[in-house]
Image (cartoon, grey):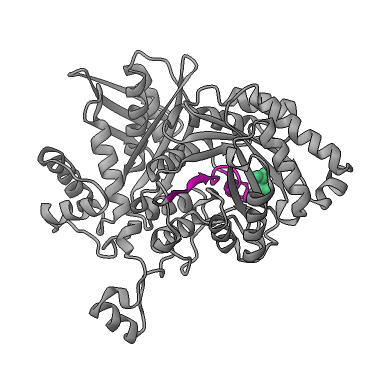
Amino acid sequence: MSDRLYIFDTTLRDGEQVPGCQLNTVEKIEVAKALELLGVDVLEAGFPISSPGDFQSVMEISKAVKNPIICALTRAVEKDIEVAADSLKYAKRKRIHTGIGTSEYHIRYKFNSNQDDILQRAIACVKYARRFVEDVEFYAEDAGRTENEYLARVIEAVIAAGATVVNIPDTTGYCLPEEYGAKIRYLKENVKGIDNAIISTHCHNDLGMATANTVSGVINGARQVEVTINGIGERAGNTSLEEVVMTMKSRKNLNIVTGIQTKNIFKTSRLVSSLMNMPVQPNKAIVGRNAFAHSSGIHQDGVLKHRENYEIIDPLEVGISESSIALTARSGRAALKHRLSLLGYNLNKEQLDEVYKRFLELADKKKDIRDEDLEILIGNTTTRKNNKIKLEHLQVLCGKSTIPMATVTLNINGETFSHTAPGNGPVDASFRAIKQLIHHHFRVEEYLVQAITKGSDDIGKVHIQIENKGNYYYGFSGNTDVVTASVEALIDAINKIV
Ligand code: KIV
Ligand code: ZN
């Protein structure tokens, strides 16, 4: 029997601490939904006391995502814990992640304290968090540099106080794999009650050993790993989700399984990379552009003779399909169907007809259609089908020395309505026209436009969040025309109010 390893994703908390890579709430919801599809068990959504934006994101993610446990980080401070509990109020399953530094460095130079006082504070924060939630994870910050005997005392005490998961972070990325594994084993063998909690790894990559340390932790008894997509995170980053998951999947002798849908790894990697503006290094294990590219003649020949001669993972297992071959306007329905099935979409005839129609429209405007474009076509087609409000026509007038104007025609419950409005740009004019056509008051809270691959003929992706009577609704669209994409995204969000 294999053991189950829980995947705790901290892309949206530790990963997001990278300077310049911060996401807004709309983007975080998009990543959270992708992580849910990927199958993560726990999703650390933020550090709510740190900013109103983080608080709001944890709350919105709690509403938008149902399967994973939603986790919020705190310090060992009562106010932090109260705010975290409040931010989690909509989560179906919730966890508070609280803790304190336990190494001599942290005790002396961060807290100007002593071991006994820190032990008491650790116990107190777990007990306080347990007043709000049943699932409390304790982290012993800088556990990597904490002597094992004291660490064991702290861990034993917090488990007795009610911690359900105990996190052993190598905060500075200092440990060697053997050392980190031995630390986990020491806790397994010396902490009374250790079987009442799950041991979690949390390794940073300062010496390039985050994955090795994490795997060593698992071999020695940890059953939760804290990871980020593409290994992003402060300094040299965190342990990368895809590396650990594929290690477990490829090395069957470890007898460990995860709940990750590995076919979604590649697209989640690209989503995080593009939203965070953080390119993936070409030789990055599992998700780098060259991870499965064989360039030497000997290797190419070997792979063609038998893939496993030079490949330990089938690229399809992580969702890398034949996407280097782009589809074009001349591609038939069968080619489209095949590519969609590689991406995990098995459409019935009616759905395929609809997507194919939109595919041909797009292929007329854009030479090569890639997987990212297809994902958008699928999203646009499936989410719009049953909408009560549909965009029938849009015409805009804009340019230098022109007053931007937009005429929007909507089909609302089968009837057609049109309005023309001016604005400070074509998007603003279109949104004003829409406001006149629908009976719901709304305010645009967030609006984001992005190109998804490259080139001026690229698809523009639009994410939008609107507010209506204190509730927030999220809309999305992609189109080669960014004004149309913006209007479609707004209508997508309005349909959710309806
Ligand atoms: O690296 C670390 O120690 C952390 C903790 C706050 C869990 O990120
Ligand atoms: Zn960390």
Is 16 within the magenta? Answer: yes
Q: Position of residue 33 (x, y in %)?
A: 41, 38
For the C terminus, give its image quadrant: top left
Left or right of 131 in this view: 242:
left
Q: Seen in the image, is 302 located left or right of residue 165?
A: left
Of 81 and 273, the residue lying toward us: 81
Residue 276 vertical position relative to residue 496 in the rendered view, above or below? below
Magenta stretch holds residue 4: yes
What's the residue at 27%, 52% (across, down)?
Answer: 343
Q: Nearer the viewer, residue 32 or 91?
A: 91
Q: Which residues are magenta?
A: 3-22
Examine the rendering and report whether any part of residue 403 can be seen. no
Residue 456 placement (x, y as % from top left): 36, 55
Residue 442: image location, x then y, percent: 44, 19
Residue 196: quarter of image: top right
Residue 97 drawn at (x, y percent)? 63, 36
Please state if 416 lies on the left or on the right of 179 as rendered.
Answer: left
Q: Is residue 290 above or below residue 414?
A: below
Left or right side of 16 for 328: left
Residue nearest the viewer, comparing 473 with 84: 84
Q: Quadrant of residue 249?
A: bottom left
Residue at point 74%, 33% (across, down): 123
